[in-house]
Image: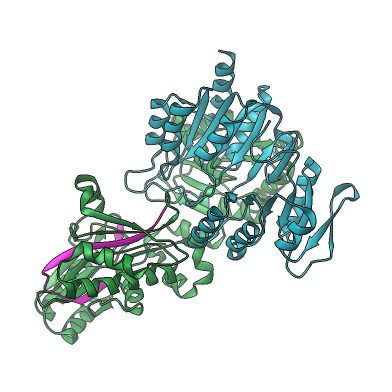
Amino acid sequence: MSIFIDESTRLVVQGITGRDGSFHARQMMEYGTNVVAGVTPGKGGQTFEGPDGKAVPIFNAMDEAVAATEANASVIYVPPAFAAGAVMEASDAGIGFVVAITEGVPVLDMARAHAFARDRGTRVLGPNCPGLISPGKAKVGILPGQIVAPGPVGLVSRSGTLTYEAVYHLTNAGLGQTTCVGIGGDPLIGTKFIDCLEAFKQDPDTRAIVMIGEIGGTDEQEAAEYVRANLDIPVVGFIAGQTAPPGRRMGHAGAIISGSAGTAAEKMEAFEANGIQVAKRPIEIAELVQAALAG
Amino acid sequence: MDLHEYQAKEIFRGAGIPVPPGKVATTPEEAEAFAREFGGMVVVKAQVHSGGRGKAGGVKLAKTPEEAREHAGNILGMDIKGLTVQKVLITTAEDIATEAYVGVLVDRNSQAPMFMVSAEGGVDIEEVAHTNPNAIRKLTVDPRYGLLPHQAYWLANSLYDDPALIRQAQKIMGQLYNAFINAGASMAEINPLITTPAGVVKAIDAKVSIDDNELFRRPVIEGYRDTSGEPEAETEARDADLTFIKLDGNVGCCVNGAGLAMATMDLVKYYGGEPANFLDIGGSSNPEKVVNALKIITADPAVKVILFNIFGGITRTDDVANGIVEATRSIDIGVPIVIRLTGTNEEQALEILKNAGFEAYTSMDEVVSKAVELANQA
């Protein structure tokens, strides 16, 4: 099994005619994701040429796209000024799962969009996230398909390339994944660690979990408490930013140590105190998972 | 982006919040002239992006214009937490009866703007949060409706008993919320919000941080940017669309992705080295970006080695390798470069780099320990 996406995912690409949208639409289709529609205002009626001669219809708006294709998920590759609007449009059209890849979305825009989506029961992943992949089934976003493999490990991370690093070692060690989820590096994200942990808990195929966090906020600490109270499968953690200076934003908008809160040390302590094994180096993640699954 | 007090006060004035008059001086003579213009007592306040200005001696009361000139002479050029004071705000001194704290920020947990107010103002609010959390009233605002009148009243009512003060403060809460939203702020703070013996509520200090993601649509606020307090390399990096933060070590780091960049810095430390910087070059293989990154890193004389750590996901690593080779041909580096490339087409990438005379690796641990070894030898 997997979480959030699988073979039944019927995906709309919002911003399919843009540079990133068209490139990744093709990549997702090559991986086997069922891309049923694209949306770009003003380009309705055209078609998007996917790989192997597969054509995807383009619509002006999400309501049309959903009515015509029974889409149940969407992914957003529109510029920052329009990303929050795209989230709300997808939610308004009845989409249950929206993945916002766009980086640099104004935080107050997202505050409104998250509230809007929550009221309508839409799960938002991101923004500023790499998306997710259920190996062998579907991928939504920009994660590279060639480094994953099906298997028993669920992975959730605030980072992009650091996730690839961890997945790469897992796959090389023969440890495939149920689903790898990048929740994003922004301060206001729609799906947090705990949401992913709850979903993995419901998935009988997920037999170990990797959590990759970073400085800023307290989501990792809360997730650690959830792990102790609710999960009986092994969880391995990693925190980036032990050498980050306080008060500075480390690339990700949400990666900032405020006052004395949100440090890597604090998060690693919370992990250890709640039975999560902490990897000191990225390569140790796979080693610890392997040991936990063997033991 | 943090604003100076005088900039934050301009925003507050624009929103209608009562703020005492003030002017910015860059010389003692100007300070004297402004003090004379205002008449009476003034406060001379250092304008730097740092807390603790008062403790550092950067805020002084002046009874006469001559005294204002003297204080400005001492404060201008002063070093406050590594920042040189280049401007002082001259503002009228107010009689203070009470001091309160009012702040609004974007709260990560509720995913909404949140007010925090306390009748214990004029002090470090983080300290109050620690020692006396009950003294702080918190209120979450639904960003779709904005601050409702009754919410503004609740906040004001928690600060004062006198109905006349409550009315004034209620109005200020709404004005502060509007200022916060219209500026695209991540934080706006009045500390202290004072009452005068005559019963007037005023903001005598102001602190505002802007969400960097808002700046593209707020040119006036972008114009408030003051780069004088930051390392030159960080200004150059921003202009080149790179995320760069200068640190104190000697291992120059050039990494794709913020999370991997932080993990690389941590690994440098793990192997006994010290990172010279945080730098995220993003996902592209564009040689120009690599050239800009190398220029910025090598401008720091402390850098003894440059470490590339690139994970090619969608980006093909052979493209990245070609970009690095092209970039390093066009500028003089002067220190050793070690490179780690992993991901799509890594065999070809290593071949390209080795043919160009670079030390290339596929393991992050190997390349980082090698970089630390080279830095420590130098």
Where residue B353 sits: x, y (%)?
70, 38
Above-or-below relation of B370 to A71: above
Residue B294 seen from this side: yes
Q: Residue at x 67, y 46 (%)?
A: B324
In front of the other: B56 or A287:
A287
In front of the other: B223 or B237:
B223
Q: Residue at x 53, y 71 (%)?
A: B217
Q: Which residues are magenta?
A: B83-107
Above-or-below relation of B369 to A184: above
Q: Which chain did the image draw in green?
A: B
The quadrant in which residue B36 appears is bottom left
Where residue B31 sits: x, y (%)?
21, 78
Q: What's the image's color scheme?
A: by chain
Q: Is residue B260 left or right of residue B130?
A: right
The quadrant in which residue B346 appears is top right
Q: Residue at x 54, y 59 (%)?
A: A116
Q: Identify the hue of chain A.
A: cyan
Kindly give the residue lying farthest to the right in the view shown. Answer: A53
